Image (cartoon, coloured by chain):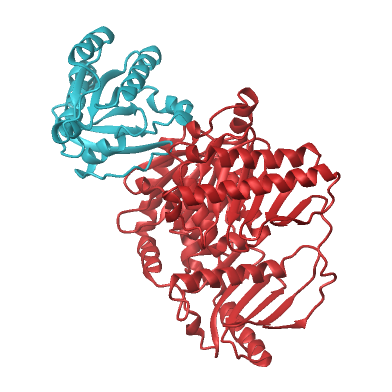
Amino acid sequence: MINIKVKTVLLGNSKVGKTSLVRRFIENKFIDSDVSTIGGAFVSKEVFSSSYGEVSLCIWDTAGEEKYESVTRAFYRNANAAIVCYDVTCAKSWSRAKGWVSKLRQFEEKCVIYLCATKLDLIKEMSASKAVSEDVLSAYISSVNIKQHFETSSKSGENVDIMFKTIANDYIQLNKENFAEYENLCLTSNDSEKTCCFKFF
Amino acid sequence: MNTNLIEDNKCDDQNMETENWNVELSGEIINSRQYTNENLEGEISNLTKTLNSTLNFVENEEIYWQTWEWKSKQHIFILSSAGKPIYSRYGNEDDLVTLFGVMQAIVSVVLDSNDELYFIHTSNKHFSFLRKESLLLVSVSQLPSNSDLSIMRLNYIYNQIISILTLTQLTRIFQQYNNFDLRRLLSGSERLINSFIDFTENEPGFFLNSVECLPLSSSVRDNIAQAIISSCQKIRNLLFAILLAENQLIIIIRMKKYFLLPSDLHLIFNLVSSSQSFRTAEGWTPICLPYFDASGYMQAHVSYLSEECQACLLLLTVDRELFFILSEAKQKIVEKLDRNALLQQIKEAMKKPKIFASEFNVPKLRHFIYKNKNTNQFVFPQYEVPYHIPEKQNSLLLLYCQLCQQLNKPFTSLKLLFQQLKTETVLGWDTKGIELYLIFEPFVTKPEAINAVNKLLKYIKKDEDKLFIVNSPTF
């Protein structure tokens, strides 16, 4: 069985909770810390096995700080999927997220982009208000070709697993032909070998 | 207090005349060397008063000031040459703008007369200044602190900033925008600066300019090195492989012709110890090592060997595209270490407590430091009674630090120092390839102390290849 790796990159302003999101997905834990990621961190996790092979997400968790912006380019190069995160209560992180989306659109046309609102628990528990209204959001999503928008909470775990699984699944669906072709190719080459043999003997 | 020198080849106790300012003030200037005009003297005196009163004002007015561990710790400020606040160890920089302003003023007044300000001592505060091309670093302490050490500390902090930004970037930014707010670029990295300041206060490696090693038998260490080398052999542009057990070095493998100095290694230690995230994910981190090359970043692949074996492996390269190759190499290294039961050996060595001075059965010996000068490595035993409480540990470190500086003072050739102090007697010995510092009970005699030295040296010599990294393997 082949192992299908989906290169995924997490982008977004510092302090929006990219690392927390990854740790919730990988370890199913919530760590409330304000330690910033330096450079980038790499993790991978097998999500499910499909009929095409085992699918694992290889996730680049990047640093959100401005000084690492030049380095971050290396992380999203050739990414299959990008999760652009913003803090659901923070307008500044939203405008930064839009910046990331346009950058991705400019440099990585093939990359599938997902928008991810983080810290949803703040809205539910602390009754904070959303920084972006539904209308603005849906207008933006349809204008720039965002695959899907998720509202997540790493604290409660809400929608985190679903998001990563959707990404893996979307990748399979989108690239189905490639995998299928690959399998067929193996079969036909075997067949031709057989016919060869028959001809000789 | 009775000071006794066994062997004193000290040539001249007089401080070498420095060309620079050394202002001593207690309310007003009592001694200033080589100042050129009287107006300047007055101006500095006034500014110092302002500085002191600004500090006092903030100290009294602000609530946060009361939480500041002012009494025993140094306060550190970093500002840009234009006087913009960048960092304050305690309190919020924005509330201290006036203070930063005065600091900048006092330095530039001296600078205007083609001179350089290093220290100001007032009756209750001691200021040290370090001026770099684009930054000004200031430390303030209430206790009479060791001036050389303060400057050394400021240099370390400066190096930490270079390590985050590179000298090239720092210089370029301030050339382009004189008024740039550097906090924008340092945000998220304050913890590195904080923990590095703590490092300079708590770790003997700082003033000894050396590193501590994890005790391992030399054959185990060689095998670890071999496992790493054989897994990385074909990787181009791999400069260093470093294996750390917390703040102790297990092994360092280097590319031929390249070396790392202890102060650069300290920056690496700091990066690892202040980032927990490497425990869960492989890090791919840009880091600049100022002594190696301040102009650009290296990329570091940082990861822990395994859940059970919490040693941290760093692979340093100049190639930004090497992540997956290094990640693969790391897997191979772990497999090899595991296959040869080396992971287990490392794990066990990490679990073992550090050596105790009392283990050596040397009468009246309380504690010691043994430094190998050739390899810049040292042995520092576990703290024991009476150094089991933090305050005592601090004063012990301070004592070591003074000893170390007395022996290493430039322009002197002091080799051996025996000093009876109020609560302990100390002996410092600088000899071929070794620096030795011993702390005894107060009433030890000189012959007893010399005996102790011999006995200790014999023990350490016997275990030398275990306590220190003797080889310096290359790829």
Quarter of the image where one finds residue B426 = bottom right
Q: Percent position (x, y) of residue B196?
A: 51, 52
Find residue B340 and report its image quarter: bottom left
Residue B229 visible (yes or no):
no
Relative to A197, say whether B48 is above or below.
below
Return the residue nearer the eye: B347 or B41.
Answer: B41
Can you see residue A109? yes
Q: Is residue B252 left or right of residue A153?
A: right
Q: Nearer the viewer, residue B154 or B298?
A: B154
- Residue B259 position within the rendered picture, expressed as x and y whole percent measured from the top left: 63, 50
> Quick one: quadrant of the N terminus of chain B?
bottom right
Q: Residue at image x 67%, y 64%?
A: B374
Whether residue A6 sits left or right of residue B278 in the image: it is left
Position of residue B475 relative to residue B433, above or below, is above
Residue B324 percent location from the top left of the image = 40, 36
Considering only vertical position in the picture, is A141 above or below B74?
A: above
What colour is chain A?
cyan
Classify residue A15 by image quadrant: top left
Between B365 and B425, the one nearer to me in the picture: B425
Task: Give the colour in which the image draws chain B.
Answer: red
Q: Position of residue B463 (x, y in %)?
A: 54, 76
Number of marks? 0
Residue B434 appears left or right of B413: left
In this view, A113 is above or below B42: above
Q: Which residue is nearer to you in this view: B306 or A95? A: A95
